[in-house]
Each structure stands twice: as structure tokens, then as C-alpha cells.
Amino acid sequence: MESAFKDWDYIEGMIDSAYHEAALKMNLSDSEFSILYIFNEHQEGCNQSAFYKESCMTKSTVNSAIRKMEKKEQLKKFYIMLSI
């Protein structure tokens, strides 16, 4: 059983690394990349609670990342319902 956990941990690390590399290539932080990924899954928009629940990020991390993306005009308030 222990080797299964080690295998899982290794695979999860590889996936995390791939997402991190993708974020870097897009000039995004890991948090920003996660938000775009989740937003893409919802298509019609979602509120911030969906982001922090699905990404396991804190509310403040989600809020900071969204504000940063809005400043860089990568995300518009229009697309996100800001109710929590």
C-alpha cells in the first residue's frame, strides 16, 4: 500500500509541475492559471467561491489573483460574479 501512495505522490508532482510550466509559459502565476482553468470549465461565469472551493486556494489568494488579472486586462469583472 505504501508504494501506491509513493506512486500517487510522484504522479501528482509531475502533474503539478506540468501545470506550473504551462503557467510560466503564459506569464501567469500558478494561482492565476488555476483561476483561468476553473473559469474555462464553467464557461458561463461563476462566483469567487467556486474558485477557492475548486482550487483549494484561500479567499484572499483568489481575490488577489483576480484583481491582478483585471489590472493586466486578462480578466474582466463582467465575466465573474463577485458575490461570495
Image: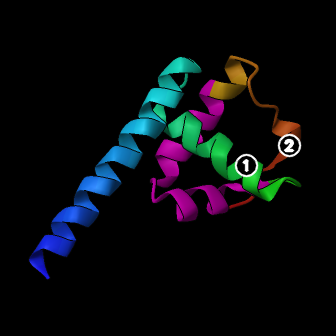
Measured as percent of width and height from the top left, residue 70 is found at 72, 26
Q: Quadrant of the C terminus?
A: bottom right
Query: Pointer 1 and pointer 2: residues touching (CB < 8 Å)?
Result: yes
Q: Is residue 22 left or right of residue 3?
A: right
Find numbered disc 2 in the image and state the secondary structure of the residue it sits on: helix
Q: Quadrant of the N terminus?
A: bottom left
Measured as percent of width and height from the top left, residue 50 is found at 65, 62
Q: Is residue 51 left or right of residue 80?
A: left
Residue 19 in view here: yes
Q: Quadrant of residue 34?
A: top right
Residue depth check, mark 1 versus mark 2: number of the one nearer the observer: 1
Find numbered disc 1 in the image and state the secondary structure of the residue it sits on: helix
The stretch in magenta equals 46-68
Name the residue beneath numbered marker 2: 79
Mark 1 neighbour class, 10 Å CA radius: few under 14, some 14 to 19, many 20 or more: some
Residue 29, placed above or below residue 84: above
Disc 1 from disc 2: Cα separation:
9 Å
What label sits on residue 21 in the rendered view? none
Q: Amino acid at mark 1?
A: Phe
* 55 drawn magenta: yes
Residue 64 in view here: no
Measured as percent of width and height from the top left, residue 15 is found at 40, 47
Name the residue beneath numbered marker 1: 39
